[in-house]
């Protein structure tokens, strides 16, 4: 099966934009949908993006997802950063089995 | 609203067994694949298993294959994970989630494997 690689951590200032990448090791990133989850300390993960670029109801439009076949990666972009966005973010995809990225700690300072 | 509530976690000795349950509500349970995902203390998320809507298809992570069994009861809107031959490295919070894409998650149940 394939692996998904994320940066360990990113940081940015409030009001700015940050992008978190998720690179697929083998096979096309476009072959299977990518999801993104936010996990705050002590809480269960919640979905912020599903099916590559779809936003669940209740998730602000500051969150967006995309895939790039040239780099075989998916990206989560958060604009207008708020301190409440500080959390761990995980990408996920699946074919015959589920695969998670290692997670990215977002610090908003 | 979609609700997933896990139960059955606890402290178990190495080599022991535990059965986790997940009670689902707020959606047509029999229409969806269901997944188990775990998170060891201070670590990232790890996919464990999923099961198709009719139970005809299941799959497992290599780390649990042969020891864990996923099942479901659509009449009871319930998902299960039978965990046998437990090891210290199985210590984690176990989450049930809706679908292969895990669009909704429960709050999790803690499994601790220790002597």
Image (cartoon, rainbow, N blue to C red):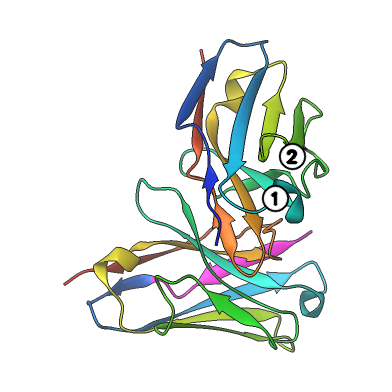
Residue at the extreme left of the image, as rendered: B115
Q: Which mark is residue A69?
A: 2
Tell me which chain the residue with mark 2 is part of. Answer: A
B6 is higher (above) or lower (below) than A85: below
The C terminus of chain B lies in quadrant: bottom left
Earlier residue among tags 2 and 1: 1
Asked whether the beta carbons under mark 2 and mark 1 sit within 8 Å of each other, the answer is yes
**Secondary structure under the numbered disc 1 in the rendered image:** loop
Q: Residue at x 27, y 73 (%)?
A: B87
Position of residue A33 relative to residue A68, above or below, is below
Q: Quadrant of the N terminus of chain B?
A: bottom right
How packed mark 2 is, by other alpha carbons closer than 10 Å (few <14, some 14-19, many 20 or more), is few
Q: Is residue B38 left or right of residue A63?
A: left
Residue B39 percent location from the top left of the image = 44, 55
Residue at numbered disc 1: A28
Magenta-drawn segment: B1-9
């Amino acid at each position: 099966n394939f692996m998904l690689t994320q940066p360990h951590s990113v940081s940015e200032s409030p009001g700015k934009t940050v992008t978190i990448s998720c690179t697929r090791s083998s096979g096309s990133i476009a072959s299977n949908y990518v999801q993104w989850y936010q996990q705050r300390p002590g809480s269960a993960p919640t979905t912020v993006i599903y099916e590559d670029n779809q936003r669940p109801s209740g998730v602000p439009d500051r969150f967006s997802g995309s895939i790039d076949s040239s780099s075989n990666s998916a990206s989560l972009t958060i604009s207008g950063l708020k301190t409440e966005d500080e959390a761990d973010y995980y990408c996920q995809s699946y074919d015959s089995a589920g695969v998670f990225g290692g997670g990215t700690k977002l610090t908003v300072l | 609203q979609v609700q997933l509530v896990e139960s059955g976690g606890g402290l178990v000795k190495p080599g022991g067994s535990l059965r986790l349950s997940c009670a689902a509500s707020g959606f047509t349970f029999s229409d969806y694949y269901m997944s188990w995902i775990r998170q060891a203390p201070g670590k990232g998320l790890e996919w464990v298993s999923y099961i198709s809507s009719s139970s005809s298809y299941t799959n497992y992570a290599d780390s649990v294959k042969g020891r864990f069994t996923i099942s479901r009861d659509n009449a009871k809107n319930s998902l299960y994970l039978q965990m046998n031959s437990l090891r210290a490295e199985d210590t984690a919070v176990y989450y049930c989630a809706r679908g292969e894409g895990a669009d909704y998650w429960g709050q999790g149940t803690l499994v601790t494997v220790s002597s």
